[in-house]
Amino acid sequence: MSGTAGGGGVAIRARGVRKHFGRTEALRGVDVTAERGSVLALLGPNGAGKTTMVRILTTLLRPDAGQVEIAGFDAIREANEVRYRIGLAGQQAAVDEYLSGRANLEMVGRLYHLPTRAARQRADELLDRFGLAEAGQRLVRTYSGGMRRRLDLAASLVAAPPILFLDEPTTGLDPRSRVGMWEEIEALVDGGTTLLLTTQYLEEADRLADQIVVIDAGKAVATGTPDELKRSVGGERVDVRLRETRQLEAARQAIAEATGRTPDVDAESGHLTVPVDAGAAALTAVVRELDAADVGIEDIALRRPTLDEVFFKLTGHAAGDLSPDGEQIVRGARREEVS
Ligand SMILES: Nc1ncnc2c1ncn2[C@@H]1O[C@H](COP(=O)(O)OP(=O)(O)O)[C@@H](O)[C@H]1O
Ligand SMILES: [Mg+2]
């Protein structure tokens, strides 16, 4: 097989990837595809198999079975061709604590056979871009978590790879650093980089990804755009909470009148939910009918399903909800709402 040339086409393609470690089936036949210039997110909880998949896609680990093609090259037989075309920032920053940020980047440049001057220039460029110009002379051991992540991301870009792999780029970052990292990632993608990232954060996948593969316990349980995944759990709905539960029956009739559908009713909490097609118009119609029937409304809202709900529906647990040994932790309240 030879590499793809020019624009368009598939940058990352994996079929039927399997990998076990002892008795652990880390991957049980996973497919992923990323078009050139697109962002693919592997979304899943701890232990789902995300890092294993990234290591296989980046030639660091051989699968037990399956095919992997990166930029048109076979990741096993043509690993060197693949390595020229990819960058990887792992879950643990792979930088030397006892070197300065600048020295770290220069070292990576020399590993890629850049001449000394070019390596230095590239290092300065990247330090500047990631807001580390000031800190560039300091030893990395004095850096904050967010600074280390940015340096690691910079290191993965020294060779200006067309395809970039980021394994949980924002895990452990404070909210501000997370948003900063998202902006960096968006800028890279605007520049034409193909990106595969892994994440446990649904809002991160929602914001950054063109396509999402939801992974749970070594299997891809769903694939689609963020909107497709949200629609798959049932689209929009109107939620109503009544001031007085004794008006439930009147409310039920008014909502059925307004939407042509029978709402789900929770008698105890005075809560009604009905799926709707024409979002805002349906909301107005419901308010109007409830008013006409003299039903007191405590709260009313048009709700779109969140990726959290998608994840729960697909897997039976929330995304951040597995303990390290895979046992499910039940957090109550929220999961009752979903079903
Ligand atoms: N080198 C390894 N040796 C043994 N088990 C491993 C190894 N790497 C991963 N695993 C196991 O494989 C499963 C998937 O791990 P991983 O790919 O790291 O998941 P994630 O990155 O989604 O948290 C887990 O059960 C993990 O304990
Ligand atoms: Mg991982």
Image (cartoon, helix red, strand yellow):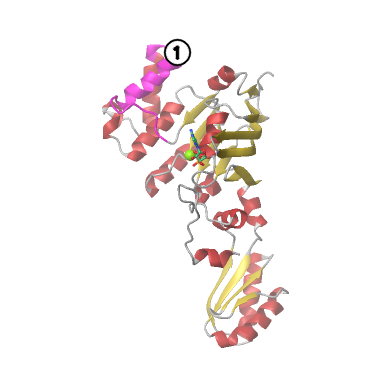
Residue drawn at x 49%, y 52% is 327
Camera-nearest residue between 262 and 160:
262
Up/down of 198 relative to 335, above or below: above
Up/down of 1 relative to 189, above or below: above
Residue occupying the far top of the picture: 115
Camera-nearest residue between 27 and 333:
27
Residue 134 visible to the viewer:
no
Q: Quadrant of the C terminus?
A: bottom right
Q: Is residue 103 magenta?
A: yes
Q: Position of residue 181 (x, y in %)?
A: 43, 40
Q: Quadrant of the N terminus?
A: top right
Residue drawn at x 57%, y 26% is 62
Residue 235 visible to the viewer:
yes
Q: Position of residue 61 (x, y in %)?
A: 54, 27
Q: Position of residue 199 (x, y in %)?
A: 50, 43
Residue drawn at x 49%, y 24% is 160
* Span of residues in magenta: 92-117
